[in-house]
Amino acid sequence: MVTTLLDHGWKKFTRSASFNKDVATSVFLGIMALMMVGYSLAFGFTLNTLITKGLGQDDSFTFLNMLLLYYFVVEFVMRYMIQNLPVIDIQPYLHLPMKRSGIMHFLLIKSLVHVMNFLVLLLFTPFAFTVVAGKFGLGGACTWILSIWTISLALHYLVIIFKKQLDDSIWGILVFVIFFSLLAAADYYSWFKLSDISAALFSGAASGASVLLLIILLLCTLYFFCYRFFIQGVYTDEQQISTVKRKAQDFSFLQGFGNVGDWINLELKLIFRNKRPRTVLYMSGLFLLYGLIFYTQDKYREGMPWFLLFVGLFITGIFMINYGQYLYSWQASHLDFTLTRPVSLRQFVESKYWLLNTVTVFCFLLSIPYAWFGWDIIFANAMLTLFNLGVNIFIILNMAMWGPKKINLTKGGSMNYQGVGAAQWVMGIPLLLSPYVIYVPFASFGRSDLGIIAIGLTGVLGIVLRPYLLNLTVKRLERLKYSIAEGFRQD
């Protein structure tokens, strides 16, 4: 059965219409995985030196053990972002003499072939056989590294349960991160020392096999729960019973804006009712916190003011960039139907224009609390918002027409490269660099403040020329609409 399923999976991959695109994506991901392996090994071999000399810690073993639970919190978040749910098209096998339980075990075990499941070995195996083996012998080093690896595998199945139960919602991961952030704060202020618990746990893992056996029991328990969740989803009757009806979103106030408002209403429903665009929206909200990394450090505010332009552009235009790069791909499944209806393409384009611009203004308003770090930040963000509204919006509206790919809206956005084409890689260049074309000439003469004002004035000029620029965009879409629709049918 295993060889049959592997053979069918390989044939499905090689015979798909998008095989060439999948191969290119797989090669790119393979290169990224090799880079991750190389960096992880280099970090693993220098870990002891970094702790003892770089951080000035005498006992690197105890210090590392204190941080391991926090490492697994970070790994959980990374897994949530890049690890997808294991899937298999099971319908063709239900009438065959193949046990459903065997198919589910195959699916769950196959899912272990993931770079994250071997990352912990690359990071900590050199440390185990150099430092831990020197303290507890070869047996202690083996039980220590196996305990860490088993916890990592347990996280693999915990993320599957987490995503399956919460329907890939961002709110669950937010609660998780906030909870452990509070634990980290309590540890820092010595209210509750999670680091002491971590040190005792992993020191015990090196001293004997009892901790390893408990962790293996945890892994088996999580595997069992995953198996139960998946085996229950095999039966069609149970799937229908467990189906939960979502509350229909209806932004009726948009009806007052005519046909453009109706188009925006449909677009908002598409966003909130489907995983991938909904994930883009939630992640854009998280990236509003991006400024806390840089605005709190004087070396960026005073020594690298040009870099703050990038931060401000990113904060105010993150939704425009993330959602806009697939602007027409979101309607891929029903674009043919749209083109057969007596609809105005201008209203279709205007609805996207107003949706992206409205969210951009909303992002700027949410960034106003950064005034705590200086009103110059808010001024720069305001100028960059104007630039996004007048210039970057038209770059996105036009570049998104460059060979858009079909997207499955029901799939999550984590490590999902469906719909990614050349335009998505190239689009970021003019979006992020165009403000510097205006800023650099002024900054080179020591008038960076005038450069920021010039960026805002350029955006105002684009807003004033909006009717003309929209006409050019609509005419271009008129020329390309049938080739775009044909491309969606071929994917």
Image (cartoon, helix red, strand yellow):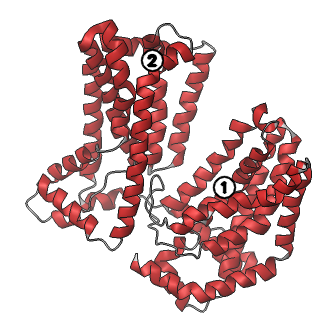
- Work out whether residue 6 or residue 363 is closer to the camera in this orientation and state it: 6
Q: Mark 1 to mark 2: distance in Å?
A: 39 Å
User: Left or right: 302 with respect to 156?
Assistant: right
Is 386 rendered above or below residue 488? above
Residue 194 at x, y percent in the picture? 50, 17
What numbered label is drawn on residue 48? 2
- Mark 1 near mark 2, Cβ–Cβ under 8 Å? no
Q: Which residue reaches farthest left?
A: 97
Residue drawn at (43%, 30%) of the image: 42
Which of the 4 image quadrants contains residue 22?
bottom left
Which of the 4 image quadrants contains residue 234?
bottom left
Quarter of the figure with the C terminus: bottom left
User: Left or right: 373 with respect to 337?
Assistant: right
- Work out whether residue 107 or residue 176 is closer to the camera in this orientation and state it: 107
Is 437 rendered above or below residue 399? above
Res. 253 visible in picture: no
- Amino acid on which disc 1 is placed: Ile
Residue drawn at (37%, 57%) of the image: 26
Residue 25 at x, y percent in the picture? 41, 60
User: Left or right: 171 with respect to 346?
Assistant: left
Q: Would you name the residue on which mark 1 appears?
A: 318
Residue 41 at x, y percent in the picture? 39, 31
User: Left or right: 404 with respect to 410?
Assistant: right
Residue drawn at (69%, 70%) of the image: 395
Residue drawn at (48%, 72%) of the image: 405
Mark found first going from the N terminus, 1 or 2: 2
Is 114 rendered above or below residue 239? above
